[in-house]
Image (cartoon, rainbow, N blue to C red):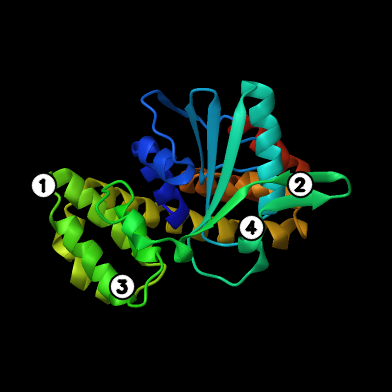
Amino acid sequence: MSFDNICKVLAEKYPADFLRWLIGEESTSIEVLKTELSLEPIRADSVIFIRTGNRILHIEFQTLTQSNPAIAFRMLDYYIRLKRLYRCLVTQVVIFLQETDSEIAFTQEYRQDSTIHRYRAVRMWEQDASLFLGNTALLPLAPLCRTDSPRDLLSQVAQEVATISDREMRQNTAAYTEILAGLRFEKDLIRQLLREDMMQESVIYQDILQKGEERGEQKEAFRFLTRQLNRRFGEIDSLIIDRIRVLSTEQLEVLGEEFLSFSHVSDLVNWLDRNISN
């Protein structure tokens, strides 16, 4: 689970807090929408849509500024899809998690020819930490905020985590905080301040570790298979590679055995058609 996906989990669990932070709106009628707009060429792993009244808050979390398609274009694409589907006000916010001087993090519009589309960019390293301290929902983001003493800020966050009375919530908040703090701090310091034993008891933490291990195995299997395919058939079309990329470790292993009987790239495409549900 990546840094930006952790933020998506937080927004799904605490949508009212994110609404209050990003648009200053209180609401008792909130619906977290499924990312059913995650169609090619846009991938919505770190996107969340929160509907309240006649407004949708579209949040996109970004660790890196470079992406394909570019962030500004994605915001325009989502806006059009959301507007067409829900016909209501759409407020869009891109939250940049890791400090950077890239111009992309300071850009708040898509502009090409006569088309101009604007959205809001939030840079976590410019945010006032006081907005996040004392709020369990937003607390894991606090280590990324503006401060003259990052270590003191992390220590303060750790102290607040330790005071959460509900054991499960304390463990999960510690796990979220540990992961996001990794964008700014050394792992040893994080574990020293947040208490490794408290994090490791967390169901969320264990799930993250397991998924990380599975993702590592999948990536290794994908790299090995694509090397073998390129040796056998020459450079494979990027669209085919993208289809292979989403296969599970088990599917990659099966394909690794069966591709030896393929005589042409079309055999590979046929296999993918049969084994990947559209």
> In terms of depth relative to the viewer, which is nearer, 58 or 148?
148
Residue type at tag 3: Lys
User: Sequence-wise, which precedes: disc 3 or disc 2?
Assistant: 3
Q: CA distance from mark 3 to mark 4?
A: 33 Å
The residue that disc 3 covers is 187
The residue that disc 2 covers is 265
Residue type at tag 2: Val
- Residue 151, horizontal then vertical, whole percent: 29, 76
255 on left or right of 50: right
Instruction: Residue 23: tell me if it is visible.
Output: yes
Asked which secondary structure carries label 1, the reply is loop
Residue type at tag 1: Ser
Q: Callout 1: 10 Å neighbours few (<14), some, many (20+)?
A: few
User: Sequence-wise, which precedes: disc 4 or disc 1?
Assistant: 1
> In terms of depth relative to the viewer, which is nearer, 34 or 157?
157
User: Sequence-wise, which precedes: disc 3 or disc 4?
Assistant: 3
> In terms of depth relative to the viewer, which is nearer, 118 or 207?
118
Asked which secondary structure carries label 4, the reply is helix
Q: Nearer the viewer, mark 3 or mark 2?
A: 3
- Residue 10, horizontal then vertical, whole percent: 36, 44
Q: Nearer the viewer, mark 2 or mark 4?
A: 4
The residue that disc 1 covers is 165
Q: Which mark is residue 226?
A: 4
Tell me what residue is drawn at x 71 percent, y 51 percent. 109
Q: Nearer the viewer, mark 2 or mark 1?
A: 1
Q: Callout 4: 10 Å neighbours few (<14), some, many (20+)?
A: some
Asked which secondary structure carries label 2, the reply is helix
Check the image and report above or below for 187 versus 231. below
Check the image and report above or below for 271 versus 130. above
240 on left or right of 187: right
Tell me what residue is drawn at x 30 percent, y 58 percent. 177
